[in-house]
Image: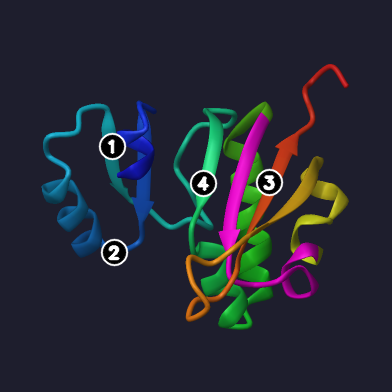
Amino acid sequence: EAIYDADYRDIVNIDISDVVIQQMHDRNHGRSNMTWLVMDATQMTLRKGSFDVVVDKGMLDTFACMGRIEMVSAYLSEVKRVLRPGGTFACFSYGDPPTRSHFFQATCYDWTTRVLKLSPKDETERACYGYICTMRSAVE
């Protein structure tokens, strides 16, 4: 919602739960150009190279905290597949670099990664990290 409210459009949102998708669709009925799809993030039915930007705000953490490394790999492979050359994957995580950076560094993903530490609003919150992965363009 915040991304839409910042004037970004043509947003596709996915979740494996049809209940969550229906709730979000209903909550955002006034926001045009937002699509809500029930979909498994490890087996997306979206076209290859169809997005300039993919944003993750919890999916990678879910798989990592479950200890499901094979799901992390399947998920990141799908993100790579749906990103266009030169596209960006912005993954926001509570996992600090020692626990998350290795996921993004596999050469098969063909992207460069930089890490941003996002300070909490106050001392009661944990820091969040932005792992910003940029796909190499097709001509590199």
Q: Was residue 96 drawn as part of the magenta stretch in this picture?
A: yes
- State the residue position of label 1: 35
Element marked by disc 1: strand
Compute the Cα span from label 4 to label 1: 14 Å
Left or right: residue 70 compared with residue 112: left
Q: Is residue 124 above or below residue 36?
A: below
Compute the Cα span from label 3 to label 1: 24 Å
Classify 10 Å Cα crowding around label 4: few (below 14), some (14-19), many (20 and above).
some
Closer to the camera: disc 2 or disc 4? Answer: 4
Residue under the image location 58 percent in, 81 percent down: 65
Badge 2 or badge 4: first in the primary sequence: 2
Compute the Cα span from label 3 to label 4: 9 Å
Res 53 label: none
Badge 3 or badge 1: first in the primary sequence: 1
Rendered location of residue 86, percent (x, y): 71, 26
Contact, mark 3 vs mark 4 (Cβ under 8 Å): no
Q: Which quarter of the rendering shows the N terminus?
A: top left
Rendered location of residue 130, percent (x, y): 63, 54
Classify 10 Å Cα crowding around label 2: few (below 14), some (14-19), many (20 and above).
few
Classify 10 Å Cα crowding around label 1: few (below 14), some (14-19), many (20 and above).
some
Stretch in magenta: 87-101
Classify 10 Å Cα crowding around label 3: few (below 14), some (14-19), many (20 and above).
some
- State the residue position of label 3: 132
Dot 1 amino acid type: Thr
- State the residue position of label 2: 17
Residue under the image location 35 percent in, 26 percent down: 7
